[in-house]
Amino acid sequence: MSKAVIYQPAKSAMQSGRGNTKKWVVEFDNVSPRRVEPLMGWTGSDDTNQQVRMRFDDCEKAVAYCEKHGIDYSVKQPHKRKFRVKSYSDNFGPTTVRGPGTDPI
């Protein structure tokens, strides 16, 4: 029996925007162990489900797919983004750290 994980991916470190983070992803866990191919040293497995990644518009559709096909699943809820409101003038306040030679005139 295969087991799946449903999650909403986080943005990568190379992204400045939040593209490709709105959809929900279904990925399958490893069922068979990986093995090292002796001649080339590549890693392989008999399980092709670990190569499958499906995207859904919302979590409910991903859960419905898993239930329809009899797949055990677990849902990882996304972390909420922390947003701090700052203004440009905060860079020059009395509590900001200044380097040597930058004392106010």
Image (tube, rainbow, N blue to C red):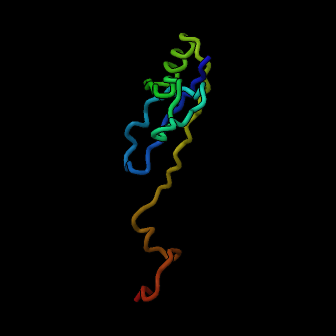
Q: Is residue 61 left or right of residue 19?
A: right
Answer with left or right where residue 6 lies relative to residue 14: right
On-image quarter of the N terminus: top right
* Residue 20 placement (x, y as % from top left): 39, 36
Look at the picture and state if 61 lies above or below 103: above
Q: Quadrant of the C terminus?
A: bottom left
Viewer-nearest residue: 73 or 30: 30
Q: Position of residue 83 (x, y in %)?
A: 50, 51
Identity of the residue furthest to the front in this view? 39
- Rendered image quadrant of residue 23: top left
Residue 18: horizontal and vertical position, in percent?
40, 42
Q: Residue at x 44, y 24 (%)?
A: 56
Residue 35 versus residue 89: which sits nearer the camera? 35
Q: Residue at x 45, y 68 (%)?
A: 90
The mark tally for this picture is 0
The structure residue drawn at horizontal position 49% and vertical position 18%, both measured from the top left corner, is 61
In this view, 86 is above or below 39: below
From the top left corner, tell me how far across and down residue 3 is, in percent: 60, 22
- Decide which of 8, 87 is in the foreground and name it: 8
